[in-house]
Image: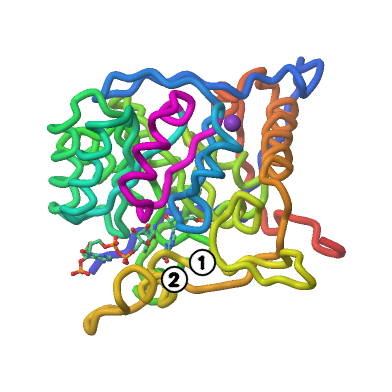
Amino acid sequence: MRIDNDPKLDFDDVLIRPKRSEAPSRASVELEREYRFLNGGGVWKGVPIVAANMDTVGTFAMSEAIGPPMLTCLHKYYPEDALVDFFREEAHSDSTFFTIGLNDAEFDKLVAVKKKADVRMVCVDAANGYTKFFVERVKRVRDAFPTMTILAGNVATPDMVQELLISGAADVVKIGIGPGSVCTTRRTTGVGYPQLSAIIECADAAHGLRGHVCADGGCRFPGDVVKAFAAGADFVMLGGMLAGHDECEGEWVMDEGRRVALRFYGMSSQEALDKYAGGRRDYRACEGRAVSVPYKGPVLDTMQEVTGGIRSACAYVGATRLKDLSKCTTFVICQRPHGSMFA
Ligand SMILES: NC(=O)C1=CN([C@@H]2O[C@H](COP(=O)(O)OP(=O)(O)OC[C@H]3O[C@@H](n4cnc5c(N)ncnc54)[C@H](OP(=O)(O)O)[C@@H]3O)[C@@H](O)[C@H]2O)C=CC1
Ligand SMILES: Nc1nc2c(ncn2[C@@H]2O[C@H](COP(=O)(O)O)[C@@H](O)[C@H]2O)c(=O)[nH]1
Ligand SMILES: [K+]
């Protein structure tokens, strides 16, 4: 056993220090970024916010609403026919990840859909991205599809970011062990890594190889999305912040014919395991919980809060483009990140 004594940070441990700025208006801040991917070689341009592949959030309707310019990782439970129809539209192929887990049936479904439609981006998602098996599964997708853009995770440390970029031949590594809004991994297993430090350390490792990272989990407010980008994230993935909108699928709580709340649960919760895995197997625990999220209306209203927050942050620190936010950022360590009397 050993102890790492360096302080590690979460979103609530920091604020971004304002600086003299020449920004004339928040409207002129450029939010689009362009990336060329390390192993697939593809080029993507857009606003690098990604809807998470949770079954309530990673929906066809979410992708339609936010992308392009934003991205959606579809949940992995759509049937093959529906996926073929969906990926036949160019705008969808440009802005949507096909998601698979680790089992063969999911890989086979990808191969089948890819034969009939233009899938360009794949998310290989597992709770634990540290296993050799996971790296091999990512590499199998690369071997089958040399020019595919591959997003793979989750991990939270630079060693495994490098491993996934080099041995797995992924393009973008998804960062986050345990920060999610409906995640209980840290309580159940004691394992995790403070998310802001994970992003800073993993982005540094990825960028050194010309790879990219996607911060996944723990963003509760637009300011957290800003902090994730400021820490060096190339993409930021959102689950809970996008739950409860018109574009979500799932079980709604209704009142006099109107939606009042959405049942939202972790993909490793009892609910999800009952729904998709025939219950919880006898050797494992759940690592997710279920909550009710109030109905929030159209997702684009929330997205405007997010993009507005990023624009304003850029203007506060003198970044004319989202691309420059990280280099314009000085984080200050703080004890009270938000005023709390009425908020
Ligand atoms: N970012 C995060 O912190 C987390 C995210 N999630 C999300 O929930 C989804 C479902 O999660 P879940 O059902 O737990 O797992 P996964 O769907 O990710 O499981 C994939 C495979 O990995 C194997 N595995 C080995 N070690 C682990 C481990 N420590 N944790 C989980 N799987 C392991 C499992 O085998 P076996 O069952 O035989 O061990 C299983 O076959 C994930 O795909 C992810 O989207 C879940 C937990 C954490
Ligand atoms: N440990 C768990 N993590 C989960 C589970 N379901 C999803 N997730 C992860 O959370 C993010 C979204 O985070 P949010 O804070 O934006 O809501 C998602 O992309 C997964 O990585 C789970 O059951 N357990
Ligand atoms: K659209």
Q: Check mark 1 vs ligand 2: CB closer than 8 Å? yes or no.
A: yes
Q: Residue furthest right?
A: 342
57 w.r.t. 140: above or below: below
**Residue 182: which numbered mark, if any?**
1
**Residue 288: which numbered mark, if any?**
2
Asked whether 90 falls inside the magenta stretch, the response is yes
Q: Check mark 2 vs ligand 2: CB closer than 8 Å? yes or no.
A: yes
Ligand 1 lies in quarter: bottom left
Q: Residue at x 52, y 31 (%)?
A: 48
In the image, 298: left or right of 328? right
Q: Which amino acid type is shown beneath numbered disc 1?
A: Val
In the image, 19: left or right of 46? right
Check contact, mark 2 vs mark 1: CB within 8 A.
Answer: yes
189 w.r.t. 243: above or below: below
Q: Residue at x 73, y 67 (%)?
A: 260
Residue 13 visible, this orientation: no
**Which SS class for mark 1?**
loop
Nearest the eye: 253 or 241: 253
| Quarter that holds the C terminus | bottom right
Please identify the quarter of the rendering in which residue 255 is found.
bottom right
Colour scheme used in the picture? rainbow
Q: Which amino acid type is shown beneath numbered disc 2?
A: Gly
Instruction: Give the magenta-colored segment's residue range.
Output: 70-94
Asked whether 322 falls inside the magenta stretch, the response is no
Horizontal and vertical percent for residue 12?
62, 55
